[in-house]
Amino acid sequence: MTMNDRGISGGDAELQRLSGDACSVLKRICAAHADHPFQEGREDSLRPSEMTRAEFRLALSELWREGWLAAVRKIGGERIFYIPSGRWETAQNHFFPITPPTLSSDGIHLSAQADPGLAGELFRALLFAAEEGLPLTAKGAVHKKYVNLLAAKLQLNERHLQGLGLRSPYPEDYPLPAILAMDLLLHLGLLERGQQAYSLAAPSVENWLRLDDSEMFALLLSAVSRRYGRRTAADRHFRCLIARPAYLPGRWYSLKDTVGWMEAQGLSAPGDRAALMEASVAWLNGLAGFGWCEAGVTAEGSPCFRWTSVKPQAEQPIKKAGQAAERIIVQPDLEVLVPEETSYSLRWSLACFAELDQCDGMWSFRLTRERLERASGRGMSPQEIIAWLDRCADHGLPGEVRAVLGQWSRDIGRTALAETLVLSCRNEQDADLIAGHPRLLGSLERLGPRHFGVSRDQANLVRKELASAGMAPLEGLPSRSDEAKSADGLFRLSSPPSGESEPGLQFTLPSDPAAGLWRGDDYAAALPPEMPPTLASPKELWPDSADVPSMWIKERRRYHASTARLIMEQAMKWGTKVRLTMEEQTCEFIPSRILPGAWKVSGYLLGESGETSQERELSDEDWDKIQLVVPSFPAVPPSAPGGGCGMMG
């Protein structure tokens, strides 16, 4: 499953190749179930009244064979069907086109303003997981202390998330922004679970950071649309509908008009309007929390919404030639500004040695001594960092900044606090100064010309006093399990862009699309798909065809009432219809049951176009001639997927 699975290239062209019956059935399945699974045996409720059971089964078989339906078996052996992701969006867009009317902005009051973007929040969460870790308790949950620390780093408004129905396995007092961030990181495959902690999946993180905004936003919108919000087909339709290009960024749209249109199209039930409106407002608030949308209320008190300029798009825009995608702006006051088109890989490199202040619109970082010291402890020398900044900064590195960084770099590394709490000095002169420090007497034990032993309870005092003396020790990396060391390779400075994407490097979602802190509703896509069954010939579709007189099928004739009844019964057995001559007019009739008592049959009489029907009761006196109609058997090449003509059941 790749980042392009939200849409299938040429989907409309593939729809055009389907038969009319298959399109009619697909439209009804799309409206009733969206992309949610439905149980085998319940699909007959979707059969149009003007379509026979045989035609319906053949249409379902065609959809299955052509990939518009997928079938899997649950653990208990139950078979379920669903429209695959990408195919469903294409079908909804094709069968239910919309041109929504816009609203004037006059009198609209904002009820939910757009927060910083979700991509930036996940960036913060990745950085936290890399630097602080996400250790697990004995029960397999992340320690509450670390969940709270992660939440403190995020700017997601918890109020915007409260109506999304997050199925968190954690207690209610755990902050929702941290829960959502961890769930999305797991769902995207950026975090992986070990025995003692969640750790970064380094290769996936590197490929994720190579994506641009449009690619990230498309993936994130697809993920949150599947995992969060009320879980009904109508809500799924609403979430997909308003994400279409027809809903333009910056334009206000009426929620009431959108829901009313859905009712008119059969995408929601009129009786569900109040619940759908409430759930839709909650969803719009969630989109505002993700930075993509703003919600409001008109002067009449009706809810409305508009997309922001960063609305996710299904199609990735073409990058303009000459974009300055790898430039940053270093200010004399040590602030680093990052233009919006700058790659996330470069932003990550900055975060390795600078403090992330803002990640909304133009990102900003701040150069600090603490972050520079921490980067040095991870193997990035100050000289390497200064050279990297000078190379990436627009107009080079300001002299004031170069001087400050140079001063910091001269102090960094004069001492190093090793993991064994052995203080190591650069030279004997520094060691002699430390040995004579009046406030460190009793806190250190000299082990050699340049080394001291540090008692654990005195480590903080030693750090403080050495920092005051201009000799702050480098922090040795604390001991960690092997499962946490995968993040170490992510702390490095990005290389200059080559101008071309590296071959074979593409972000891919995990094989389990329902992965996360909890199982999502799209579990079916993770199960092995079943191939449609193969039928070698029409005789297998009509097993008793040899016992049916051929003249019943070949021509319309006048028959005795008893024979006419047999033809009607055969049509019901095969799930097909009959062709009648009534008052010198030819029409078709789908029998449903033989009525008790006097010989009569109930069913649907089709109009001349075959698309309208009316329920009727007929006797043999109501027609002159009758003919058994058998659906034409589709011609499928043996090499086609599934071969032959498969049937449901």
Image: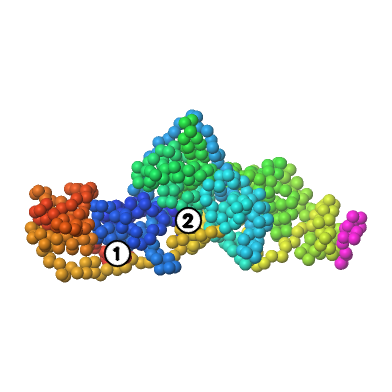
Q: Bin the neighbour count of mark 1 within 10 Å (Cα to Cα): few under 14, some 14-19, many 20 and up.
A: many
Q: Which disc number belongs to residue 3?
A: 2
Three-letter amino acid code at disc 1? Met
- Asked where in the image residue 427 lies, by quadrant, the reply is bottom right
- Asked where in the image residue 493 lies, by quadrant, the reply is bottom right
Whether residue 111 is situated above or below residue 44 in the rendered picture: above
Residue 558: tell me if it is visible: yes
| Image coordinates for residue 419, horizontal then vertical, percent | 76, 64
* Residue occupying the point 33% across, 52% down: 28
Q: Which residue is mark 1?
A: 647
Comparing labels 2 and 1, the label whose residue is closer to the camera: 1
Which of the two residues, 549 or 533, is positioned nearer the viewer here?
A: 549
Does the stretch in magenta take in 482?
A: no
Q: Earlier in the sequence, mark 2 or mark 1?
A: 2
Whether residue 274 is situated above or below residue 20 in the rendered picture: above
Q: Is residue 13 left or right of residue 208?
A: left
Which of the two residues, 11 or 450, is positioned nearer the viewer here?
A: 11
* Residue occupying the point 29% across, 68% down: 534
Three-letter amino acid code at disc 2? Met
Q: Give the extent of the magenta segment.
A: 433-450
Q: Is residue 88 left or right of residue 460?
A: left
